[in-house]
Image: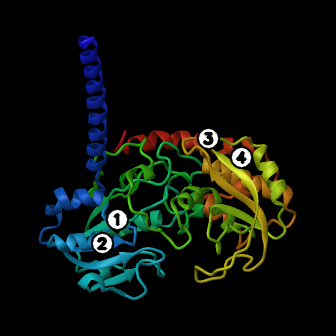
Amino acid sequence: MLLKVIKYLGVLMLVFVFFTDSRDNTKINNGSFQLGDEVLISEKIGLLKDKRVAVITNRTGILSNGKYIFEALINKGVNVVKIFTPEHGFDTDDSYKNAGFDIPVISLYGKNKSFEETDIEDIDVLVFDIQELGARYYTYTSTLYMTMMDASKSGKKFILCDRPSTANLNYFDGFMLNEHFTSFVGMIPTPIMYGMTIGELGAYLRSYINNDGFDFEVIKMKNYTRKINYEDLNLPWVNPSPNIVSLESAKIYPALCFMEGTNISEGRGTDTPFQQFGAPFCNGEELTFVLNSFHLEGVSFKAVKFMPYKKISSYDPKFMEQECNGVSITITDFSKFRPVEVAIAVLYALRASAKEFKWIENNYIDKLAGTSKLRTMINESKSFKEIIDTYYDELEIYKTKREKFLLYN
């Protein structure tokens, strides 16, 4: 009997040790993840020694503890001379004066969408640290490409701090950018969803800059893989722009950005922008029925009513203080969610069921899609499959190019 008890206790101890070790390993693994900016500060700060540094960033340029990158750099003795900010800016004035710092802040959302050569005459190194959403038409990708090109022309070193993407890194999809439709919402030579971290994207874009002498470096994250979802990292969330108000909004945004090229509300002016769409003349139930007929994986649709009631941007949202009938989108399986296909299905459903649906702003949809093919095929009532098949060959070519620049398994 005593022998049985000893054996039983021994098994319990083994189970206890196993689970204790598992918990400890989990803590170690979670604690060992580092953002690119944290690696720069902890291991590669020598790159900035005795240099005049400008940081291209916004409120998302933070460490895991929530501290801004430029504050952390200054605390390490780095000479941060300027802050450049993308669309939506950084603060309400033209300098950052919190926490005892007084640094000039220069907007990159002016006439030229990048810095002038005179802006960086007194700069040795540019450090880029901004959260993106994995979509070509989110303009921080354009800011990255344009500042890289201008840094190259001016002979300045460019350091890109990598960050985890809110998008699925194993997913890339959509029309490639046709150069005839290049704009600030379509600047980079990729499909709509490019399936790379900002660091990988930067390395990819570097290959398009014809300057062998361009001193460009990506600071990789530590202990990061393509299988890690953004929320698993427990990073502090900062809205990357005024209408991306949650991680869910960031994930669905690529599926509903096309609404900006139509007379349909994308939910701006509500508490859940880019998670619902509609208009006073829409029929939510009918739209839901059509969308469900596509049998799209990883997503569900629900008829809703909503009313845009607040002004967040410099202009009023569509249908301000008018009740809209439409559809809300919920991600049910992120690994299967394909936002570009959802976007095309939404346009297809709107064209089929809403007589008042139309394109606006001189076919702005073409700039978002990177081509006129999408609009033309929707107008011609081409099938959903025909539209997707149109860009298949280009996507296969991109797939081969992309693989050369992936930094994580």
Label 3 packing within 10 angstroms: few (<14), some (14-19), many (20+): some
Q: Is residue 126 left or right of residue 304?
A: left
Check if mark 3's residue and mark 1's residue have beta carbons within 8 Å. no
Looking at the image, tell me whether mark 1 or mark 2 is earlier in sequence order.
2
Check disc 1 and report the residue beneath it: 129
Please state which amino acid type lies under the numbered disc 3: Tyr
Q: Quadrant of the N terminus?
A: top left
Amino acid carrying mark 2 in the image:
Val
Residue at 26% of width from left, 82% of height from top?
A: 99
**Which amino acid is tagged 1?**
Asp
The mark that comes first in sequence, 4 or 3, is: 4
Which disc number belongs to residue 392?
3
Q: Residue at x 30, y 69 (%)?
A: 67
**Which numbered disc, 1 or 4, marks the residue that appears first in the sequence?**
1
Instruction: Residue 304: give x, y in percent of width and height.
Output: 76, 61
The residue lying toward the viewer, choosing from 50 and 177, is 50
